[in-house]
Image: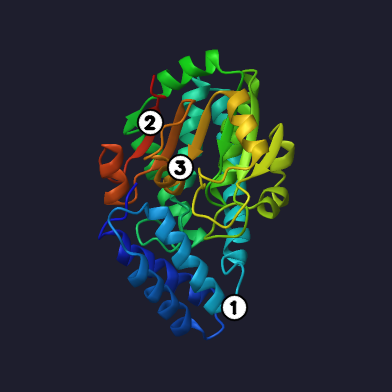
């Protein structure tokens, strides 16, 4: 997805939010570094993830922090844990456990702190949970995913946010009950409130998946020009990707992959919704097939 005018204020809002999370009095320096990076790199022909990665890299350096979200990520995991157990029970008793598990996973995507279009504190999850479940799936390619799962030997599961990853466990368990090998993919370094290897290990994700890999670097989503060899091999052998969240969509939407990719997310901003061809503020399961 290319950078749009709407991306600029969203990016700056996130930088200010994370600077205040760190609370070391360097908000001005962090925001200034981000503004400088944005002014140098803002280009409508450049992928949004490329610009956002550079902006956050400079903002983190000026802030003097490698992970300003570290505390709120742990809080999000704690808040989401009771919902994981409740949703697991709902899936195992459902007439359509795959769709129910997807619904559990997509609800967690609202844990996108500082974006201005989701929630800014884990404690707010309780107040939006019931409404999001009641809303259901606004774009639903679950049946297409089901068909692809019959052919694919495994799934590469790309994580997004902490807290959300607790609910991803529900879908991962369902995929494994269906006989699928599941390879989890986390960020290669702390960036935003996204799941890193340390975060995944903290919540026991290594016990939920068959293998846990990383994108290998500090990057929004994944850098498809620099995919680690072990991850590239797993994508080839599994034959199917499930990508959680908007960052993974932004990083992938302009790419033509050799395997189907299924995006599971909530459309929390206009640029992503427009790029997907769906409305904003809906829960989405959208499959993108490889070009022949």
- Residue at coordinates 59% horizontally, 59% vertically from top-left? 73
**CB of mark 3 within 8 Å of CB of mark 1?**
no
| Foreground tag (1 vs 2) | 1
SS at mark 2 in the image: strand
| Foreground tag (3 vs 1) | 1
Query: Which color scheme is applied?
Result: rainbow
Left or right relative to 23: residue 266: left
Q: Earlier along the polypeptide chain: callout 3 or callout 1?
A: 1
Taking depth in this image into account, of 114 and 226 the one nearest to the observer is 226
* Residue matched to label 3: 107
- Picture disc at residue 286: 2
- Picture disc at residue 64: 1
The relative height of residue 268 versus residue 231 in the rendered view (above or below) is below
Residue 51, x across and y down, in percent: 40, 60
Residue 28, x across and y down, in percent: 44, 84
Q: State how far apart marks 3 and 1 are (Cα).
A: 33 Å
- Picture disc at residue 77: none
- Residue at coordinates 41% horizontally, 80% vertically from top-left? 32
Residue 55, x across and y down, in percent: 44, 67
């Amino acid at each position: 997805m290319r950078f749009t005018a709407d991306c600029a204020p969203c990016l700056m809002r996130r930088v200010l939010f994370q600077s205040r999370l760190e609370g070391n009095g360097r908000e001005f320096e962090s925001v200034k570094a981000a503004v400088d990076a944005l002014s140098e790199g803002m280009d409508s022909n450049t992928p949004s993830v490329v610009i956002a990665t550079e902006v956050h890299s400079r903002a983190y350096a000026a802030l003097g922090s490698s992970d300003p979200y570290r505390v709120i990520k742990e809080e999000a995991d704690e808040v989401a844990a009771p919902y994981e157990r409740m949703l697991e029970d709902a899936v195992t008793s459902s007439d359509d456990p795959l769709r129910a598990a997807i619904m559990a996973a997509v609800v967690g995507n609202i844990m996108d702190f500082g974006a201005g279009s989701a929630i800014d504190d884990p404690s707010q999850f309780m107040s939006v949970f019931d409404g999001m479940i009641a809303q259901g799936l606004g774009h639903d390619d679950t049946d297409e995913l089901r068909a692809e799962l019959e052919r694919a030997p495994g799934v590469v599961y790309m994580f997004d946010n902490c807290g959300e990853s607790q609910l991803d466990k529900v879908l991962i368990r369902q995929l494994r009950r269906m006989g699928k090998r599941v390879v989890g993919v986390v960020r290669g370094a702390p960036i935003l409130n996204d799941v890193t290897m340390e975060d995944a290990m903290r919540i026991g994700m290594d016990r939920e998946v068959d293998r846990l890999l990383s994108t290998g670097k500090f990057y929004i989503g994944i850098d498809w020009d620099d995919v680690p060899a072990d991850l590239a091999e797993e994508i080839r052998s599994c034959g199917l990707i499930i990508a959680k969240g908007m960052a993974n969509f932004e990083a992938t939407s302009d790419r033509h992959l050799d395997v189907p990719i299924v995006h599971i997310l909530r459309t929390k901003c206009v640029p992503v919704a427009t790029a997907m061809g769906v409305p904003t503020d809906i829960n989405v399961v959208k499959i993108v097939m490889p070009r022949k």
